[in-house]
Image (cartoon, rainbow, N blue to C red):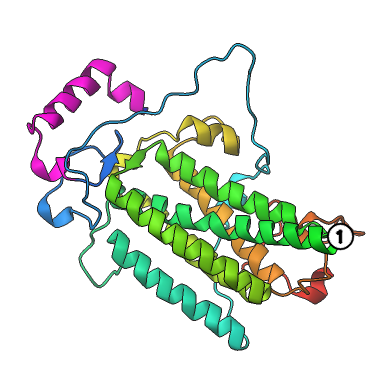
Amino acid sequence: MTSCKALFSPTLTANLSKAASKGLLPSTATAAGLRAGCATFRPFDAQSRRHFSGSRKAQLDFFPPPKNLPHIKLTPPAWPHPEVTEDQLKSIEVGHREPDGFSDRVAYNSVRFLRWCTDLATGYRHDPNRPYIMSERKWLVRFIFLETVAGVPGMVAGMLRHLRSLRSMKRDNGWIETMLEDAYNERMHLLTFLKMAEPGWFMKFMILGAQGVFCNGFFLAYLVSPKACHRFVGYLEEEATKTYSFAIEDLEAGHLPGWKNLEAPEIAVKYWNMPEGHRSMKDLLYYVRADEAKHREIHHTLGNLNQAEDPNPFASEYKDDAKPHPSRGIEYIKTKGWEREDVI
């Protein structure tokens, strides 16, 4: 497979940057708000331009590994990713939990509204009855934007539960760690995609606004109803699982030729422990989709529990370990989450 560094030498990169600064490259390419990586760097016609088009000139930015430090050998991930098999990755399914009650319906309709806003902002459309418009660059725009938002709920929920544990001087029964790991995993998704493309200033501004509104809104909502917030995130992760499933289908159908022979970034290979021969862009999307499906299971399950008293089933040990039960991995994953009577 061909890596980014193999495609562009430092000399070629410098020449391309100079050409861009002098206006020698096609204007439609240099006006892109997302500075494309080697997998998607090519001229685009006017019809393919997305809504994020703030940067006037394109630049090629590569992200080398950290320089060697005199004392630090390696900084391993705080939460190592659980081992998964290829069969488990490919068994992930798109699913939906039907709303049950007023709070569930509010959560579900809120996600539908946010999905519409995000689709509009990122130029996303995946309607089989209309002309196909998605490309590698547009998928990256969507991935990056979504992951900057997806990492918020776990951190906010973990922080609020941490503060409640402090002021009540009681244990949290394992919820905090899972919430922080949730946020950490979503951030790893973002860091992985940032190895492939860097947002322009306009997209960064949009991300700043979206994060500010969503973070504060979720903070207040979690104070009022943690149960509804976990259900909201469960529905949000249903949409994320669907999005990555569509991207995989596009890649397998040949609609994304720039990703056909693209290798996953080194940060992804190390984090997911991707085996030799299974380090392609398609493999990466399978890993990310499985993570989103896991978040879907976690939050739908937590939304079924007593928020103040029940222990976290994903951090608990079970009397009968041979019986299917919640875990950090995806060996017993449930699309609609676990019901309270099954785990408590």
Secondary structure predominantly adopted by residues drawn in magenta: helix
Q: Which residue is mark 1?
A: 169
Q: Residue at 30% across / 67% down in the picture?
A: 120
Instruction: Tell me, yes or no, whether the highlighted magenta stretch contains residue 30.
Output: yes
Q: Is residue 238 visible?
A: yes
Q: What is the residue that sits farthest to the top in this orientation?
A: 70
Q: Is residue 306 left or right of residue 192?
A: right
Q: Residue at 60% across / 64% down in the picture?
A: 296
Among the 4 quarters of the image, the one containing residue 50: bottom left
Segment colored magenta: 4-31
Q: In this rendered view, identify the residue nearer to me: 113 or 136.
A: 113
Q: Is residue 278 visible?
A: no
Among the 4 quarters of the image, the one containing residue 105: bottom right
Q: In this rendered view, identify the residue nearer to me: 140 or 335.
A: 140
Which quarter of the figure is the C terminus placed in? Answer: bottom right
Number of marks:
1
Helix, strand or loop for disc 1: loop
